[in-house]
Image: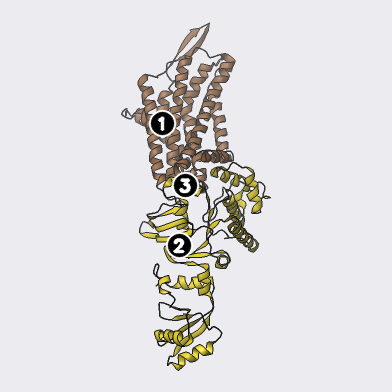
Chain colours: A brown, B yellow
Amino acid sequence: MWNTVKSVRQISRHDVLRRFMMGFITVLFLGGVVGSWYDYSLSDVTGSDMFATVMQTFPMVLTSVVMANTARICGWDLTDRTANYEILYGNKRAAVYFGRFLVALGKNLLFVAAVTALAPAVCTLWNGWGKSLDFSDALAHYALLFPVVFRMVCTAAAITFLVMSDIGGLALSFLLPIVTTLFYLFAKELGGASIPEWLFSASTLTAVEDFRNKTVGFADGADYLIYKTSLDGALVLRTLVSAFGIGIALLTASFAVYRRRDLN
Amino acid sequence: MADVIIDVQALTKQYKTQKAVDSVSFQITRGMICGLIGPNGAGKTTVMKMLGGLVLPTAGAFTIFGGQTERELAHARTRMSFIIETPYAKGELSARDNIEKMRLQKGIPDKSRTDEVLKLVGLSDTGKKPAAKFSLGMRQRLGIAGALLSRPEIMVLDEPINGLDPEGIVEIRTLLKKLNEENGVTILISSHILSELSMLCTDYLFIKKGRLVQAIAAEELHRQCGEYYHIHTDDDAKALAVLQNQLGITQCDVLRDGTLRLFERLDDLPAVSRTLYENGLIPVTLHVHEADLESYYMNLAGDDNVEHGQIGAADQPS
C-alpha cells in the first residue's frame, strides 16, 4: 500500500490542474470570508468572528472542492491506466484502492485544517479571540468538520472508482454536494422536514456549522456579536455515526465492485 | 526435469456470450523465450492480462512460481515485468518522472536505477518533454525501461517492438536475447512481426479464436518449416508404405487430409517420383516445399477446421 501512496503523492505534485483548482478556490474562499466583513474595519474582527464566518462559508465553497480534489487524486491515473502498473507490479487491488483513498484523505484533511484555521488564526493574532464564541465551542465545531470531510472523501473516492475516470468522478463529485444541498434546502423550504440532515454530507455540514443565530452583546463600550450555536449531543452523534457509517459503507461497496472488475 | 514457472490450466475468459479465451493450457519453463502468436482478437492480450491480474478468469487457473492464491500471485508478480498493449505512460510527465512513478509503484529503493534504465533504452536525453509528445517507438522504449526496472525473472511483453524503427527493433531484440542468455530471464512475448519472433523464440504458442491450437518448440517448428516434399497421390496410404519399404523413409508426416510430408531424399526427386510410378501410384502433387514461421502461421491461421489440441495429434510422424 505504501508503494501506491508514494507514487500517487509523486504524480499529484505534477498535477497542474489540481494545484490550480486548489489554489484558485483557496484564494476565492479566503477572499469571500474576508470580504464578508467589508462593512467593518478588519481591526475590529476577532478570531471568533472570523471562525464563525469561515465555518458558515465552508459548506458552500469547500465541500465541492474536497470532493473534486479526491476524484482527481484517485482517478488521475485510472483514466490513462497507469494505475494498472501497480497490479502488474504485484500490488494487491486493496492496496491500489485504499492507497489512493489514504492520499486523498490525508491531503484533504490537511487542506481543510489549514484553510479553515488560517483566517481565524490571523485575526486572533491581530485582535485576539474575542467574545463572540466560546473557544471550546469553536473547537468542537472545528473537530466535527473532519468526520464530515472523511465522509466526503469516501463518497468521492467511491464514485471515482465506480466510473473509473477522474473527469467523470470530478464532475459527479463536484455536482453532488450542490445538488444535494439544493434538494435539501428546497425540501425544507417546501415543508418537507422529513428529510434528515445526516442523509447528505453537505446538509450535515450546513446543520453542524450553523452560525446564523446570533445576537448583539455590549461590553467595554462596544457592541459585539454573540453566536448561539446549535450543537447538541444528538446532532454530534448523528454526524459522527452518519459520517463513519455511510462513508465506510460507500467505500466498501465501491471496493467490492473494483475488486471483481476487469481492468481493460 | 524442466522448471515450470508459469503453469496455465484450462484458463477461460468469457465476456457475456463471447469466449475471449477458451480453456487454454500451457506451461512456461525457466529460460524459455515463448512467442504467443495469433491474429488480432485471438485472445493473446487477454491471456497476458489474466497473468498480470488485470482481467479475472471466468474458469481455469494458473500458477506463477507455484503461487496460486491472490496473495501468492501478487508476490510472484513482484518478480515479473509486464508490457501490455501500448505501454501506459502518463502523458503529462516526462520520461524520467514516468519511470520514477514506476519505481515507486514497484517499491524499488534505489533511485539511480531510474537513470540506468533510461540510458539503457536511449531515453536519457529527453529532458522534460512530456510523454504525450513521444512517438510510439519512444513510448515502447519507455515501457521497456519500466519493465527492466526491477531486474525481473519473467517478462511478459505484448507487442513490445510495435512502432519501433528497424534499429530499435534490432536493439530490443539484442537486449532481450542478452537478458535471456546472461541473466536467465524467461520471456513470454507476442508480436505481429513473425520474422523477429523466429530470431528470438525457443518455443511458440499458437492461439486462435481464444483457443490454443498448437504449442511447439522452435526446434520442432523449424524442422517442420524446413524443406520437405509435399506428396499427394491417388492412394496416399499406399504411397507411405511404398516410400517406407522401398526407400527406407523414416521421417514422414501424415497430415489430416492424408497427404504426406517427406523430410528425406530432398536432393533426389527423380528417385522418389520413379518409385511412386513404378508402384502404380499417380502423384497429384509432388513438389519441394520450403516454409518459414510466417507461412507456418498462415497455414495454421487459415485452417478453420483445426481443432483445439488436435493439430499435434493429426500431424503425428508416421
The residue tagged 2 is B41
Q: Position of residue A44 (x, y in %)?
A: 56, 14
The residue tagged 3 is B74
| Residue situated in front as seen by the camera: B162 or B199 | B199
The amino acid pointed to by label 2 is Gly
Instruction: State the separation of the CA atoms marked 1 and 2.
Output: 46 Å
Disc 2: host chain: B
The residue tagged 1 is A201
The amino acid pointed to by label 3 is Ala
A262 relative to B171 in the view: left or right: left
Instruction: State the separation of the CA atoms marked 3 and 1.
Output: 36 Å
Residue A141 vertical position relative to residue A261 in the rendered view, above or below:
above
Disc 3: host chain: B
What residue lies at 39% left-to-right and 43% top-to-bottom? A256
Q: Nearer the viewer, mark 3 or mark 1?
A: 3
For disc 2, the neighbor class at 10 Å (few under 14, some 14 to 19, many from 20) is some
Q: Position of residue A216 (x, y in %)?
A: 46, 12
Instruction: Determine whether the residue tagged by mark 3 lies in a helix, strand or loop.
Output: helix
Residue B180 vertical position relative to residue A173 in the rendered view, above or below:
below
Instruction: Determine whether the residue tagged by mark 2 lies in a helix, strand or loop.
Output: loop
| Residue situated in front as seen by the camera: B207 or B154 | B154
Determine the residue located farthest toward the right in the rendered image: B125
For disc 3, the neighbor class at 10 Å (few under 14, some 14 to 19, many from 20) is many
Instruction: Determine whether the residue tagged by mark 1 lies in a helix, strand or loop.
Output: helix
Whichever of labels 2 and 3 marks the residue nearer the N terminus, that label is 2
Q: Nearer the viewer, mark 1 or mark 2?
A: 2
The amino acid pointed to by label 1 is Ser
